[in-house]
Image: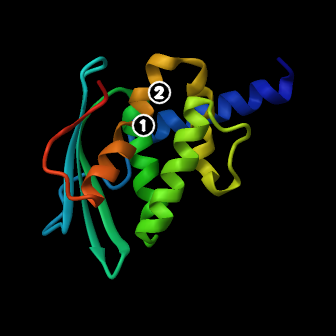
Amino acid sequence: MTSMANELRDLYQEVILDHSKKPRNFGELEEPTHDAKGHNPLCGDRLTLALVVKDGLIEDIRFLGAGCAISTASASMMTEALKGKSEQDAEALFGAFHGVVTGSAEDEDDELGKLAVFAGVRDYPVRVKCATLAWHTLRAALADKDEAISTE
């Protein structure tokens, strides 16, 4: 691995650790319009996602729960990326993110921005479920699904 690739990998790890230790948008949301619960039985990750959606725009989004570093960082960075976005933008970002972490996308999508730090997860298939839990929970919340989402 080249020195530049090592530096990039180290930077990505720092970003993930920072969001894991100091998650953004963590906490309860008063009067959400949408919410859902997610669970990854393999890792033990659990989260509740709450959103305020008005006129198709995600005005606010927060999460509660406990999980591994990848799961927490993914939820934190997802909430940052989605504030102010439309539901359609959220769905497009879900597709791009899912493609990158599962390896089904050829290249990292430019629209991912900072979320591209999760590209390395595709090399660890068991961690893909950790990275995508918040995203699948988001889809359930936007679809107003009542049942808890499970990665299994």
Above or below residue 14? Residue 97 is below
Residue 78 picture location, percent across and down: 44, 51
Pick the front one: 123 or 18? 123
Q: Which mark is residue 15?
A: none
User: Which corner quadrant holds the N terminus?
Assistant: top right
Q: Is residue 108 left or right of residue 2?
A: left
- For marks 2 and 1, give the CA distance: 6 Å
Which SS class for mark 1? helix
Residue 20 picture location, percent across and down: 41, 36
Number of residues whose C-alpha sits closer than 10 Å to that of mark 2, classed few (under 14), some (14–19) or many (20 or more): many
Residue ID for mark 2: 128
Q: Are marks 2 and 1 in contact (CB under 8 Å)?
A: yes
Q: Amino acid at mark 1?
A: Thr
Q: Is residue 99 left or right of residue 91?
A: right
Which SS class for mark 2? helix
Residue ID for mark 1: 132
Q: Amino acid at mark 2?
A: Val
Residue 129 picture location, percent across and down: 40, 28
Above or below residue 121? Residue 62 is below
Number of residues whose C-alpha sits closer than 10 Å to that of mark 1, classed few (under 14), some (14–19) or many (20 or more): many
Q: Is residue 5 left or right of residue 15?
A: right
User: Which corner quadrant holds the C terminus?
Assistant: top left
Residue that appears at 42% across and 37% down: 132
Residue that appears at 70% across and 43% down: 108
How many numbered dots are placed on residues in this image?
2
Q: Is residue 100 left or right of residue 82?
A: right
Residue 24 picture location, percent across and down: 38, 52
